[in-house]
Amino acid sequence: MTLIAAALPPVRGTLKADAPLAPLVWFKAGGAAQWLFEPKDAQDLSDFLARLDPDVPVMALGLGSNLIVRDGGVPGVVVRLGKPFARVEQVDATALRCGGGASGILVSSTARDAGIAGLEFLRSIPGTVGGFVRMNGGAYGRETCDILVEFDVVLRSGEQVTLSLDALDYTYRHSSLPQGAVVVSAIFRGVPGDPAAIQAEMDRIASAREESQPLRSKTGGSTFKNPAGHKAWALVDDAGCRGLQLGGAQVSEKHTNFLLNTGDATSADIEALGEEVRRRVKAKSGVELEWEIQRVGIKSPLEPLSQGKDT
């Protein structure tokens, strides 16, 4: 679908055509968004979506840490929540209201300052609140479902609704949040805690992550979901994929469930390497790995839009 500016609703935020997405994602690879929209506030987003042709695909973009943007780019509108959505404020003694664009580091640090424990694990997830809610983000034994009370979302129709945890039907790294919906805020609840002890736990998590993961590389975080009864990294390692390369993409030698852009990888290189890893793991162990990283966009202008599903 070709979208010309005259066919788009007016906005109070910013709307850019043919906006490169590679600088906005951790892999630093991939094509452009047909349109990149940064709304001024939730009402701006709501008005825009309500007036936008319902056939136009809409995708929310957070920090781009768990994402492959295919080289052909993303048709339709990519919504990126900027500073107006990055605020975190205390609701009561143990709860925070967090903007959909707030980072895990900001949320956990605010919780520490307020003496709220139980949110330390967010320190280790390189994403935003919107992504945590959509994907049931988790690490170090905790998940978003453990702390989420309710969330505000703008549906693809433009309707603004407040939903509870139960509405998401959470499973491992998956929710039933509708396609095109954008989480604009969420309330997370912890328990009373001592700020010094909270900081010590955050430091422990940060140190463990630094030691085990290739954080200073162009990567996308955990590539594959952990199958029942298995660790994805161990299956990848056992299949002989540690350090495996394809074009400019490589399986990390430090943590085999991470793929790396060693410098000039295309998104096609990265995705093809992931598929080769899946093939080798299946051949070695009989286990079929599922992608955890979301893969969006088109491989070329001739291929239909995909929204992160296995192909």
Image (tube, rainbow, N blue to C red):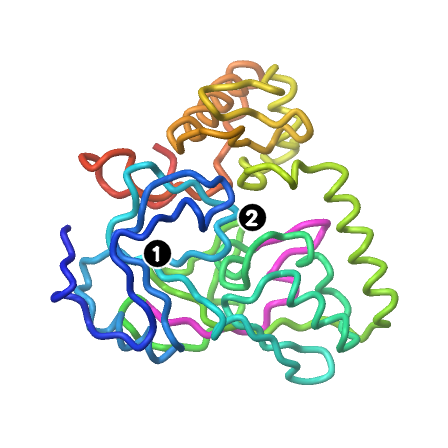
The alpha-carbon separation of the residues under discs 1 and 2 comes to 21 Å
Left or right: 288, with 304 as reference point: right
Q: Residue at x 14, y 52 (%)?
A: 2
Query: In percent of the image, x 48 and y 50: which residue is there?
Result: 64
Residue assigned mark 2 = 172
- Is 142 covered by the magenta stretch? yes
Q: Give the residue displayed 15% in from the left and 50% down from the top.
A: 1
Is 120 left or right of 178, judged from the image as shown? right
Total labels: the figure holds: 2
Q: In terms of image quadrants, where is residue 226?
A: top right
Disc 1 element: strand
Residue 267 coordinates in the image, percent (x, y): 40, 33
Is residue 53 found inside the magenta-colored segment of the image?
A: no
x and y, in percent, of residue 195 in the image: 83, 71
The residue indicated by pointer 1 is: 59
Image position, residue 231 (x, y; %) = 65, 32
Q: Which mark is residue 254?
A: none
Nearest the camera: 23 or 287?
A: 23
Span shown in magenta: 137-155
| Dot 1 crowding, Cα within 10 Å, few <14, some 14–19, many 20+ | many
Please state which amino acid type lies under the numbered disc 1. Met
Task: Please identify the quadrant where the C terminus is shown.
Answer: top left
